[in-house]
Image: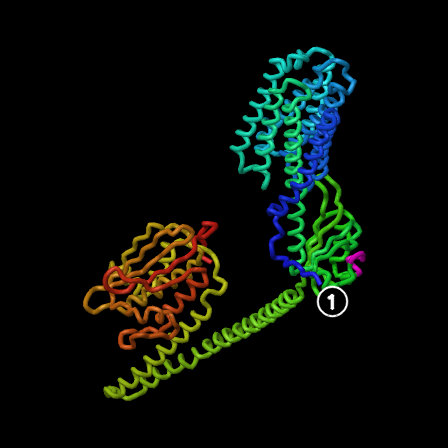
Amino acid sequence: MTAQQDPNSPLPSASTPRNAVLRALPMAAFLAAILLLSRIHYLWFHTAVEFTSAIIGITLYIIARSSYHLHRNDFLVFISQAFFWSAGLDIVHAMVYPGMGLAGGNFNPPPQLWIGARGLEAIVLLLSPLVLAHPRERAWTFWVMGVVSLGWVWLVFSGFLPDFFIPGQGLTPIKVASEYAIIAMLLLAGIALSRRRSQLPEGIGVMLFGMLGLTIATELCFTLYHSMYDALNLLGHVLKVLSYGLMLRIVLTSMIDQPFRVMSRSAYSFDAIPLSVLELDRQGVICASNAHGKAAHPDSIGQSLFSVWKIDDSGGLEQIRSALDAGNAFVGDIRADDRWVNVVLQPVSRGDDSPTQGFVCVLSDITDRHESERALAEAKDHAEEVGRELARKNDDLERFTLILAHHLQEPVRRQHLFTQILLSRLPHPLTDEMRQAADFVLQGARRQQQLVLDVQRYLSAGQGHKGSCTIDAALSLSCHAGERNQLAASGGLDVTLALGKQPVAMAADDLSNVFAALFDNALSFRSPERPLKVVVGAEGLGERIKIWVSDNGIGIPKEYRDRVFNIFERLSVETNTGTGIGLALAKKLVESAGGRIWVDEPDAVGARICLELPVAKDGLPSSH
C-alpha cells in the first residue's frame, strides 16, 4: 500500500541536490559525446552543436507560444522569439561552414551569420527590461525579428558586408569589434535586468544571469580564435550549447514546471473545498468533480447536472439552461434533491475574446438557511399580526377611556351644581364646620372635573395634528390664558428667540400647549422667596431646533428628573395644585412630532426644561 500525500503538505521541491544532479547528468553525457565527436571529426562536432542549439532555440519559442495561456509571461515570450530566429541563422551558419561544400572557398558567411544571430539575441536581451516593465503580448515583434533576420541573410550572401575572417590571418578587426559590441550589449542587459530583479519571474533570476554570463564567455572565445577548427572555437561552441541549455531550463521552469506545480496545489485545494465543485461542458455534462461532489454523487462523471442533482422546475431550472446555452454566468437558489441549493455557474474560456469552453459550477446546501429565513418570515408576519391586534386593542382602549372621561364629567358637574344648591338652601349663617365641609366638596368636584379634562387632552394629544408653525406664534398663543397671561403682562416672562421665525415641524396648537404646560409647571413650583422669572430661548442645531424654558423656582431634584414626565406623577403634593398630567402631555406632544424633551441642568436656581424639534421641510407655517 502506498502512502497518500497530505494535501496540506508542500509539494516536493524541484531544486533539491538530488534533482539537480539528475538534471545535470544528461547534459554531462551530451557534452562528453560531442567532445568525443570533435576528436573524431570536427565538422561533425560543429554540425551537431549548431543543430542542437538551433533545435533548442526553436523549442523555446514553441513552448513559450503554446503555453502562453498558462503563464502569460510576455518577457520570456519576447526573448524566445529572438532565439527562434537566431536558430534559423545558426542552421544556415552550419550549412555553409567550411568543409560542408555549400559556400565554396568563401570563409565569410559563417562568422557573418554568427554575428547576426548573436547580435539579434543581444539586442532583444537589452530591450527585454522594457517588456518586463510594460508586459503585454506583442505578436508583431516576432515578425519584425523575422524580417531583420532574413534581411541579414540577404546582406551576407549579396557580398555587401566586409570580411570577417581571412584564411591564414584570422579574424578581422570588424569581426572582433562586432563581438565586443555584442558583449557590451549583454553587459548592459545584465545591469538593466539586475535593477528589475524583483520583477523577474519567480525562480529564474540566477539562471538568467548565468545564461548571460555563458553567452558573454562564448563571445570572448570568438574574439580570440585563429582557425575555424582550433580549441577556442571548440570551447565557444560548447559554451553556446550550455547557455542555450540554461535558457531551455529557464523556459521549462517558468512556463511548464511552475504553472503545473500551481495546478497541482490547486488540485489539492480543489478537493479540500467543503462544497461540491463541478466542471461542466457546454451542454451541462459533468466532466470533473472535487472530493465533496464525488461524495455526494459518486457516479456523476459523464452525466447531466440536471439528472444527477435532480433539479426540479422551481424557477432556477430554465435559468441555468439558458445560461448554459448562452455561455453566461448564473447565481441563484434552486431546488435540488429535495433540498435548497445555491448555484454559482461561471463560464471558462481560453481568453477574453474566446468562446466559452465549459463551466465551473459550485453548489452549496442552504436548506438550513432557507428554512431559517422562512421561519423568520413567518415570525415577522406573526409579529406584525400581533402588532396590528395590539394597535386595535389600544385604539379600543383609548376610545373607551375618552368615552368614559366624557361621561364622568356629568356626575362631577352635578356634584358641583347640587352642592351649591344645597348651600343656598341651608340656614344662614353657616357654621365654620359646615362651610369647611362644603368647600372640601366643591374643591373635590372642581379638581375631579379638571382631572377628567386633562385626561381627555392627554388621550387626544398628537393624533392627526400635522403641520408646522413658528416658535414665536406658538408662544403667543400660549400666553392668552389665565395666569400665563398675567405672567407675560407682569414682565415675569423673558423671551430670547433668535430663531423665532424658523418653522418647526409641529402644529401651532400642539406647541402652544407644550409652552402652556411648561409655564404652568413654573407657576406651580414658584419660590416664595423671590418673584417668578421665566426665560424662553431657542438655538439652531442644523436640521433641528433646541428650545428651553428656565425658571427661578424651587427646582427639580436630580432623582426626580426622569419621573416628572410620567402621567399623574406629583412630586410635591403640598405645593403642586395640578393634576400631574401637564409635563406628561408635553412629552407626548413633542415625541409625536418626532422630537424629544428632558430636564437639563439649570443656569442658576430653579429648573430648566429643554425640547428639541425637527425643522419643517417645506418651511411654510400652518396652524394644523
On the image, the x and y values in percent for residue 197 come to: 54, 36
x and y percent of residue 358 in the render? 75, 48
Viewer-proximal residue among 563 and 365? 365
- Tell me the residue that label 1 is attached to: 338
Q: Amino acid at mark 1?
A: Asp
Note whether 86 is above or below 324 in the view shown: above
Of 350 and 437, which appears nearest the observer?
350
The answer to whether any part of residue 68 appears in the image is no
In the displayed structure, would residue 403 be above or below residue 59?
below
Q: Position of residue 242 (x, y in %)?
A: 64, 33
**Residue at 69% from the left image edge and 24% from the top image edge:** 144
The image position of residue 540, as x and y in percent, is: 37, 51
Image quarter in which the N terminus is found: bottom right
Count of residue discs: 1
The magenta segment is: 301-307
In front here: 227 or 187?
227
The image's colour scheme reads rainbow
Instruction: For residue 65, say whether it is visible.
Output: yes
Q: Residue furthest front?
A: 39
Q: Is residue 305 magenta?
A: yes
Is residue 97 positioned above or below 262 on the image?
above
> Dot 1, how many residues are within 10 Å of its Cα: few (below 14), some (14-19), or many (20+)?
few
Q: Secondary structure at mark 1?
A: loop
Q: Nearer the viewer, residue 498 or 259?
A: 259
Q: Which of the 4 quarters of the picture holds residue 599?
A: bottom left
Q: Residue at image x 64%, y 26%?
A: 236
Residue at left offset 75%, top offset 63%:
297
* Residue sitting at the far left: 529
Let me know if residue 83 is in the magenta part.
no
The quadrant holding residue 409 is bottom left
Q: Residue at x 71, y 54 (%)?
A: 361
